[in-house]
Amino acid sequence: MNISNTILGYPRIGINRELKQAQEKYWAKKISQTELFKIGKKLRKTHWEQQIKLGIDLIPVGDFAWYDHVLSTTMMLGNIPKRHQYNNHIINIDTLFRIARGTAPTGPKTSASEMTKWFNTNYHYIVPEFIKNNTFQYQWTQLIDELDEAISYGYKAKPIVLGPLSYLWLGKIKGKHFDKLELLNNILPIYQLLLEKIKKRNIDWVQIDEPILSLDLPESWLNAFFYTYNFFNKNNKNNIILTTYFGDITHNFETIVNLPIQGLHLDLINCKSELYTLHKKIPKDWLLSLGIINGRNIWKSDLIYWFQKIKKIYNERKKIFLSSSCSLLHCPIDVQYEKKINTEIKKWFAFSVQKCHELFLLKNALKEDNIEKLVSWTQPIIERHQSNIVNDTNVQNRIKKNVLCIPKRYNKYYIRSLEQKKLLNLPILPTTTIGSFPQTNALRKIRMDFKNSKINQNIYNNEIKKIIKKNIEEQEKLGLDVLVHGEPERNDMVEYFGENLNGFTFTENGWVQSYGSRCVKPPIIIGDVSRKKDITVKLTKYAQSLTKKPIKGMLTGPVTILQWSFPREDISKEKIATQLALSLQDEVLELEKSGINIIQIDEPALREGLPLIKKEWEPYLKWAINAFKLSYYGVKDSTQIHTHMCYCEFNDFMNAITQLDADVITIETSRSDMELLEIFKKFQYPNEIGPGVYDIHSPNIPTIECIEQLLKKAINCIDINRLWVNPDCGLKTRSWDETKLSIKAMIQAAINIRNKL
Ligand code: GLN
Ligand code: ZN
């Protein structure tokens, strides 16, 4: 039996986010290209050395990227959009950054390519663009260069290539519509060239990623898999490991097992079938790469469970790899750098370094047929089940009592809305904002100083109150109808709530790349969740005491908190969401009791939590919608519940949105020219809507005319009595000058329309 350890990719950012610093310095022209490349090379070397030290046999190459690996593939294929070309089409690192950011140290400024979420993760990629008859040429040699680099250090390397079908699927057609599969014949020769170059380097295995195999694919795309992999098989002699991850692939299994490939990687964390059953169906001579270590969460693995599963197939296969389920890109680097996490808790975690070590332990245990070391490794996670850090009987009893609860409002929207109109007395087209107001450097410093104990609670509270006071004064001056306190106390809309709930822990250095140079540090849900004490009540009440206008309380919804954290795995997501919802319910009811009549519960991540395949949507939506409704369950009819959703694909989502039964939903629409509202019209969405009337991601100030135009469009779709006027999203990243001018224009546009009625 032949068994090797590998992973699908290592985090590229560096333990101190060296890549981020380097990128940002280069963009600001503070370091040269040569210096930038030197830092990249050093990072790769360090990461390879670490993996070797941790017992990885086959080093992944191609996981490093200057922005994201889809963009690296775009560069390799020479698929440079016209507007990003410059200087006789010579491709260099600035071309790459220009595609990603619209600007680079050299060359013209232009609009960047779009960015979107990588499957169901919080990582983003730059969307490839295709035009009819798109041609490709092999241009960017990064992968081969890095392969040579790894070989020169004497490492056994496994190059990683994003497969042609996934690349095409993830891209977007520009201009006239056509079938993207028409481009397959143009793109395959480039891949062939690449595979030839790899073959020349005596490489044993090439990892070709085709994550789209976990999606629902049309027949034509499944056929294209046969076509593509037959083409590779005919023209190249490489050993290919077809690699899938993020979801179950049972629905596409027939296609996969009939492909002329030499190996298959399975994400066994997300696989619904049993390993032994799968193994029986997979050709015997194929290499099987077992993705058993979860690349997307921070918990230690149950290595004894895997030992037993793998042992059953161990002698029946020629060769297996032990691997991570997906790239470790989605996981922090090393838990040893966490100095503040309590040592009992720390023993439950495995970040990337510890995950590589897990593979090492498992391989040795299998080889020696001895689980002794696995027993001591998994001991803490077994003890965890009894830990009182995890278990809170009050929460558990409350959940039990809640099981039969079907959360809903007392009356239907049209009855509630009468009560609300009476209480709130708002004009037609009421104006409001999404919650946050500009966060200046001075404000960030106040929060930092408090966190680092440089200022005490009293001083901190007073400073925050001063900012709230200013926010209220500015909003009154501008003439908004529904005000907010402005969220000055929040660094992040999820972290802030996590910090005020039991059952969470936080890392100091648990950074994960989100996009380009942006990294996030998701909170970790370690135990039963409950509210420690009131979270937003005092500051919201304070804001309300400063004005006669209604203040809108501002909360992050249960699904978004769950979605943007590392969840526990010993209970279902449904249960975690329910615990979060009940904690938020306590807050909602207390806000209501304190005289706050409007409460917004943000759920921008509700849609992104959707499973990859349609047939799993229904169960997800059932619990996700329930959690949202549970978080406001018990409020009076006269209390107006808002929700906010950022940009969202609403086409197949209207049923879900309606079921949320928020009195008001605010959404991002300005960039789509109000087109989104057509769907709300078609679907006869019954409640109130605030379509964003200007784009807060841009520093441009919208004109009154432009907003009026958009509002007129909106009125054509939605009854004016159910329309609100607001920006697209929160204003925390904008400056005060931009904010004041934009809101002024927004309010004037609303007034102009009211006057014409
Ligand atoms: N209330 C949040 C804010 O205004 C909403 C942010 C979001 O939806 N992403 O910042
Ligand atoms: Zn938003």
Image (cartoon, rainbow, N blue to C red):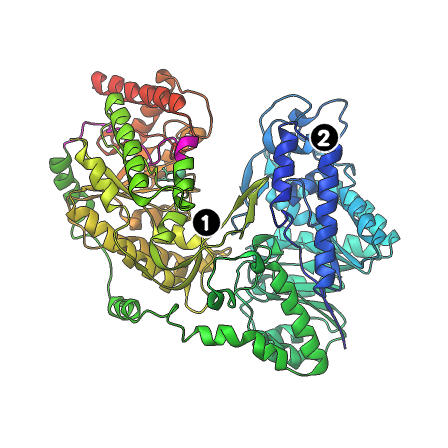
Q: CA distance from mark 2 to mark 1?
A: 38 Å
Q: Which residue is under mark 2?
A: 32
Question: Is 440 within the magenta?
Answer: yes
Left or right placement of residue 633 versus residue 298 in this view: left
Q: What amino acid type should be assigned to the residue bearing mark 1?
A: Glu
Q: Quadrant of the N terminus?
A: bottom right
**Label at residue 300:** none
Left or right placement of residue 25 versus residue 136 in this view: left
Q: Position of residue 484 (x, y in %)?
A: 27, 35
Q: Tell me if the residue at label 1 has its CB under 8 Å from ligand 1.
A: no
Q: Position of residue 534 (x, y in %)?
A: 25, 51
Q: Tell me if the residue at label 2 has its CB under 8 Å from ligand 1.
A: no
Kindly state the secondary structure of the residue where label 2 is placed: loop
Q: Which residue is located at x 39 percent, y 52 percent?
A: 561
Q: Which residue is located at x 62 percent, y 72 percent?
A: 278
| Label 2, residues with CA under 10 Å away: few <14, some 14-19, many ≥20 | some
| Label 1, residues with CA under 10 Å away: few <14, some 14-19, many ≥20 | some
Q: Which residue is under mark 1?
A: 608
Q: Is residue 509 above or below residue 173?
A: below
- Between 166 and 694, the one lying in front of the other is 694
Q: Is residue 693 above or below residue 213?
A: above
Q: Over which residues does the magenta segment extend?
A: 425-443
- Classify the position of ligand 1 by quadrant: top left, top right, bottom left or bottom right: top left
